[in-house]
Amino acid sequence: MTPQDQKAPDRIVALTEIWREVLGNPTLDENSDLFDNGGSSLHVLQITGKIHDFLGIDVKLRHVFSNTSPRSLSDFLESEGCNYLTPGGN
């Protein structure tokens, strides 16, 4: 499956796993707020890097600051057309 074919439920699952990994909390769900669960600006940086690495999506830091749960970020990405990157970078 290419990133362009990725459906919102799959993206939500992937983002939730990224939240869990970065915050070190396996109990987080799709509605878990980053900052309510101990997140910081450093975590936002880590999250954007993992999203780029695993999903091939270029997410700006401000978008994670504004959309602090996996579901809200997924909804935002859906509304923006996901801004996918091509394999290899640019």
Image (cartoon, helix red, strand yellow):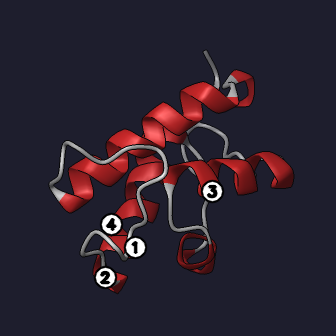
Q: Quadrant of residue 47?
A: bottom left
Query: Where does label 1 land, which residue?
Result: 44
Secondary structure state at the residue bearing disc 4: helix
Kindly check if marks 2 and 1 are in contact, taking CB atoms under 8 A apart as contact.
Answer: yes
Q: Earlier in the sequence, mark 4 or mark 3?
A: 4
Q: Residue at x 60, y 15 (%)?
A: 1
Cα distance between the residues tagged 2 and 4: 10 Å
Q: Nearer the viewer, mark 2 or mark 4?
A: 2
Secondary structure state at the residue bearing disc 3: helix
Q: Earlier in the sequence, mark 2 or mark 3?
A: 2
Which amino acid, by three-letter code, is at mark 1?
A: Val
Q: Which mark is residue 54?
A: none
Compared to residue 16, the image places residue 11 above or below, namely above
Secondary structure state at the residue bearing disc 2: loop
Which amino acid, by three-letter code, is at mark 3?
A: Ser
Task: Tell me if 54 is positioned left or right of 40 in this view.
Answer: right
Q: Residue at x 61, y 27 (%)?
A: 9
Q: Quadrant of residue 73?
A: bottom right
Query: Where does label 2 land, which residue?
Result: 40
Task: Tell me if 88 is positioned left or right of 37 in this view.
Answer: right
Which amino acid, by three-letter code, is at mark 4?
A: Gln
Say which of 85 and 41 sits in front.
Answer: 41
Q: Residues within 10 Å of mark 3 (few under 14, many from 20)?
A: some
Cα distance between the residues tagged 3 and 1: 14 Å
Secondary structure state at the residue bearing disc 1: helix
Where the C terminus falls, by quadrant?
bottom right
Cα distance between the residues tagged 2 and 3: 17 Å
Which amino acid, by three-letter code, is at mark 2?
A: Ser
Q: Residue at x 60, y 68 (%)?
A: 67
Query: Where does label 4 land, which residue?
Result: 46
Kindly check if marks 4 and 1 are in contact, taking CB atoms under 8 A apart as contact.
Answer: yes
